Amino acid sequence: MENDECQVDQVALAAFAHALLARHQRTRHAIVLALSEGVLATLLVLAERAGAEVCWTAADNAQDDGLRDFQVSPHPTSPAPSTEKTDEDQLRTRMRELARFMAR
């Protein structure tokens, strides 16, 4: 790395971003989603800047790894809060914010 620049393998970066996006899309675990959102949004911005093509329909094409996330609710009878934006919309919004911040 020199002057905050480095060479990246676009294919490897795209594969990594695709796998992380697929994992993010498969989970509904609130903690996993919260912790991974910033890392994933940053990765997607960097992949876009590097010219790596990331498939946003990753979960549809992803291989099932057999792992399942589960969440133990403190109030099992309470309905889950509804969200106005989809996870993808929120992630794309976060990605745009990061891209603007990184362009400064």
Image (cartoon, helix red, strand yellow):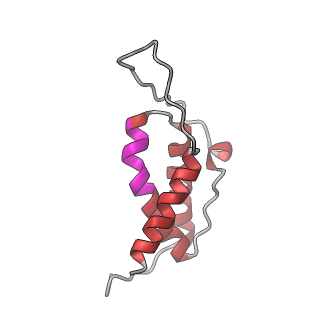
Residue 57 rendering spot, x and y as whole percentages: 66, 50
Tell me which secondary structure the magenta stretch mostly adopts. helix
Asked if 84 appears above or below 11 in the picture, the reply is above
> Which part of the image, by quadrant, shows the C terminus?
bottom left
Q: Give the vertical position of 2 relative to 76 (above or below).
A: below
Q: Quadrant of the N terminus?
A: bottom left
The stretch drawn in magenta includes residue 90: no
How far across and how far down the image is residue 87, in percent? Answer: 55, 45
Identify the residue shown where x is 55% and y is 58%: 92
The residue furthest bottom is 3
Percent x, y of residue 58:
62, 49
Indicate the quadrant where residue 14 lies. Answer: bottom right
Percent coordinates x, y for residue 44 in the rendering: 50, 63
The quarter holding residue 64 reads top right
The residue stretch that appears in magenta: 31-40
User: Residue at position x 57%, y 41% from top?
Assistant: 84
92 over 101 or under it: above or below: above
Q: Nearer the viewer, residue 33 or 94?
A: 94
Q: Quadrant of residue 101?
A: bottom left
- Image vertical order of residue 91 relative to residue 65, above or below: below
Q: Residue at x 44, y 80 (%)?
A: 7
**Residue drawn at (46%, 29%) of the image:** 69
